[in-house]
Image (tube, grey):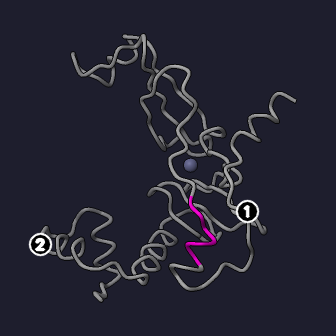
Amino acid sequence: MADFHKADIEKLIDGVLPWPATQDMLKSAKDTDRFDKYVAIMQERVDFDEEILLPLTPMLFIVAKAGERIVQCRCGHAFGDYRVNWKLSALIHVRDDEKSMSEVYRGREMPDPAWIQLREYICGGCGAQLEVEAVPRGCPPDFDFLPDLDTFYSEWLGRPLPDKSEFKDLTLDRVAEWSE
Ligand SMILES: [Zn+2]
């Protein structure tokens, strides 16, 4: 099993690894150690001290905080329970007319604003754009990734997390609370 150095993984993340070395890393079997090295690199780069359980994107992380598992931006801004789509707690900028869409699309690339809207999800802490989605009008925010953290840690990494949480999408429960 290939064992790559943390410095090489860091170069891969930053896109400064020479192409032959990148190919070598991508083709070889993935070792669990590489996950730990990746998390260690991200942990050094974020502006918070909570332990990263799983990076969702280079900007967003599931972290352990006060006995809970929450989604947090790299700036430390918290989005709440990881089983609720974090987009519900983000600032959302919607482009849904020709004028606003033409700022990001050129000519025929532009989707028909009568059907499609562009949603930009922005961190309320640092103002970073965290995600963009082009979806039909009325479509709920796409829940990109709900990982089974307990199974991942116990079955794949071989070290169960100290606590357990039910693996369940709680997004609709949160939405239901709004109408109470
Ligand atoms: Zn942020």
* Residue 70 screen position, x and y as percent: 68, 58
Mark 2 vs ligand 1: CB below 8 Å: no
Where 30 sits versus 102, above or below?
Answer: below
Q: Main secondary structure of the magenta part?
A: helix
Where 89 sits versus 74, above or below?
Answer: above
| For marks 2 and 1 on the same chain, the one whose residue lies earlier in the sequence | 2
Where 79 sits versus 20, above or below?
Answer: above
* Residue 77 screen position, x and y as percent: 64, 51
Give the secondary structure at mark 2.
Answer: helix
Where 95 sits versus 159, above or below?
Answer: above
* Residue 169 screen position, x and y as percent: 67, 50
Mark 1 vs ligand 1: CB below 8 Å: no
Q: What residue type is disc 2 on?
A: Pro
Q: Is residue 73 left or right of residue 133?
A: right
Q: Quadrant of residue 30?
A: bottom left
Residue beneath the point at 75% across and 75% down: 163
Q: For the residues marked 2 and 1, what is the alpha-carbon distance in whole angstroms?
A: 43 Å
Q: Nearer the viewer, mark 2 or mark 1?
A: 1
Q: Is residue 95 left or right of residue 174?
A: left
Nearer the observer, 141 or 100: 141
Magenta region? 147-153
Q: Residues within 10 Å of mark 1 (few under 14, many from 20)?
A: few
Give the secondary structure at mark 1.
Answer: loop
Q: Is residue 69 left or right of residue 132?
A: right
Pick out the residue farthest to the right. 180
* Residue 57 screen position, x and y as percent: 46, 56
Nearer the observer, 123 or 53: 53
User: In the rendered image, which residue does mark 2 sit on?
Assistant: 20
For the N terminus, the image quarter is bottom left
User: In the rendered image, which residue does mark 1 sit on?
Assistant: 166
